[in-house]
Amino acid sequence: MHNFEFVKPSSIADAVAALAAEGAQPLSGGQTLLPTMKQRLAAPEVLVSLTGIPEMQGVCTGDGGLHIGGATPHAVVAREAASHYPALAALAGGIGDPAVRNRGTIGGSVANNDPAACYPAAVLASGVTVVTSTRKIAADDYFQGMFTTALEEGEFITSVIFRIPQAAAYVKFNQPASRFALTAVFVAKFADGVRVAVTGASNNGVFRWEEAEDALTADFSAGAIAGLTASAEDMISDLHGSAAYRANLVKVLTGRAVTAAR
Amino acid sequence: MTKVTMTVNGKSVSAEAEGRTLLVNYLREGLGLTGTHVGCDTSQCGACVVHVDGKAVKSCTVFAMDVAGSEVRTIEGMANADGSLGVVQQAFQDHHGLQCGFCTPGMVMTTAALLANNPKPTEAEVRHELEGNICRCTGYHNIVKAVLAASGQDAGAMAAE
């Protein structure tokens, strides 16, 4: 990997200042960024670690729901969100493996927006507010396609605020080698309607299956989507599964998530 | 190059590092602690697992500078004070939980972290927690036995033989 200058600020303000440097990039848990840098697909000149900032750590309830600091590792979310939002905690506890969960963070995952990552599904289905170093962004405006988000150069996620649904579940069909989602579905039932977010399936990254949302808002049961078909257009087709296979998984996993929702 | 200081196996240590120096290279090349292995270098295999402030991490996917000042424990810190094998190491030897031995340092460190959080895991929990540690000799059965034995449980009671 190419060398760089390493900076580790201890406050959000200092991180913002450090990221103003030419060629600077934020580093969170690094579980994606380090492998990317080893392949020289990323070569920042300055790397600004966000893991030493106390105000970006931890899980607590507050205005608007459950606040999770951007640099909170998956293992901490799995443990500390369990009593507030069990489906979210279960999702965090199923990412990668134990060592990856001890380093990888929610802010890093949401900022990267890997098309097969778990967190984007929870963020979109929960109608999250993404809080950044400069503003607040609604989940529906945040995700803009594979590896693409509303984040500007130098902007980073300081926390994520989850609305807590009446019932929710995340069902993931594992790609067994990487443990990323071959396809996965997060279903969240709120008083004002049901939201269904799908990851791992689309060439455009995480998306809402609005047809299923309408059907499930009218009748929250797996049977309510029996007559629907998820479109295979724009779905990922690779050696692990064809577009049609993934489209079928979207429907099957949505049904399972509705049945499992607590 | 900058001097990076941390506590490794209870001793304060320092060595020169660049920004890009990985924790595993800091340990192996900077400190000469070659017990921690690099298997895949892509955070898949778990041969490089060490503990940072009590938590298992893949040291090939952490920058040394990012954990400066931390308490790090490696396989070299797992033996008893008199030099005899620690409980987890002894269980791996007793149950032949290794074949070539390359993955063993990571297996032992992941096991120690697992047992610190969950002192009496079930067989299913052990298999799930070892998901990030790959043994290419595929000696998993005896590894799981060793972990159960290290937790003081009867490894002979495992379902599959």
Image (spheres, helix red, strand yellow):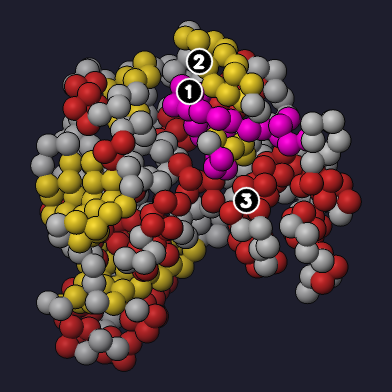
Judging by the rendered image, the residue that carries numbered circle 2 is B4
Q: CA distance from mark 2 to mark 3?
A: 28 Å
Kind of residue at disc 1: Ala
- Residue furthest toward the front? B81
At 49% across and 53% down in the image, what residue appears? A96
Element class at badge 1: loop
Circles 1 and 2: CB atoms closer than 8 Å: yes
Specify the segment rendered in magenta. Answer: B54-79
Closer to us: A246 or B89: B89
Question: Would residue A167 be found to the left or right of residue B4 on screen?
Answer: left
Q: Nearer the viewer, residue A211 or A95?
A: A95
**Residue A177, image x, y percentages:** 56, 55
Q: Residue furthest top?
A: B1
Alpha carbon separation for disc pair 1 and 3 = 23 Å
Q: Quadrant of the C terminus of chain A?
A: bottom left
Foreground mark, 2 or 3, reads 3
